[in-house]
Amino acid sequence: MSSQYLGFYGGHNTRRTAIQRDLHGTVAFELGSAILRGDYAPAEILPREADLMAAFDVSRTVLREALRTLTSKGLVESRPKVGTRVRERAAWNLLDADLLDWYARVAPPLAFALKLQEMREMIEPFAAGLAASAHDAPAFERLANAHTAMAEARNVDEWVRADLRFHLAVLAACRNELLVPLGTLIERTLEGQLRVNAKRADVFNAALPDHTVVFEAIARRDAQAASAAMAGLLRVTRERIEG
């Protein structure tokens, strides 16, 4: 099963992230991915600047800008007369959008899918209950449109886009501005999980009834039912991941 996750969570994904669109960003991506992959262990000193410049064929200015990027994300720290050291894993800011995306590419696919699932199970049932209590008309309209798009989806791609919109709309409907960036943060990695789950189901839209139960509970402002329905939906998701 884990091989099905590789295309979305493993190193075979070749999409360029925003940070890779310039030279220092590409170096930051490649060096950061190497650290996340375990090529350089925590507390290990990175190769000398001259060696890294040669390895990436870049100037000192470009390399130092890349290292500043990695420093800001908690991956490395520089010390005079010591060099640039990989920080302990607890210091890595894996909730940084770039770092999360890089980690998704190099982490063991099944392990990453389960970590993402754990995060969803902690957040989304409560969010669904909060959305039921707190949603306003514009937020509910976005949720309704996403649910309609799921019902009308004709293929996996349309389903995944609509499914992602649905879950992001639930977070937005909470009317808690701290939850909206969280949805945006995990959007790229969640899309991969939703796609795998759709392909593992008997039909791509097999989960529509479960989403409808969530939607209807939110619509009637039944927070307890919405939370329970989302928890049930995620139990099925976990079964597909582990199956």
Image: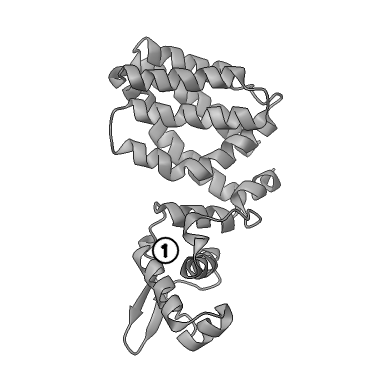
Q: Position of residue 15 (x, y in %)?
A: 59, 53
Can residue 207 be seen?
Answer: yes
Q: Which residue is mark 1?
A: 89
Q: Nearer the viewer, residue 235 or 15?
A: 15
Q: Position of residue 113 (x, y in %)?
A: 56, 44
Q: Nearer the viewer, residue 172 or 59?
A: 59
Crowdedness near tag 1: few (<14), some (14–19) or many (≥20) residues, C-alpha within 10 Å: some
Quarter placement of the C terminus:
top right
Can residue 48 be seen?
Answer: no
Q: Position of residue 59 (x, y in %)?
A: 48, 82
Q: Nearer the viewer, residue 11 or 39?
A: 11
Mark 1, secondary structure of its residue:
helix
The residue depicted at 67 percent of the width and 22 percent of the height is 154
Q: Amino acid at mark 1?
A: Arg
The residue depicted at 41 percent of the width and 38 percent of the height is 183
Q: Note whether 107 is above or below 155 in the view shown.
A: below
Where on the picture, by quarter, is residue 136?
Answer: top left
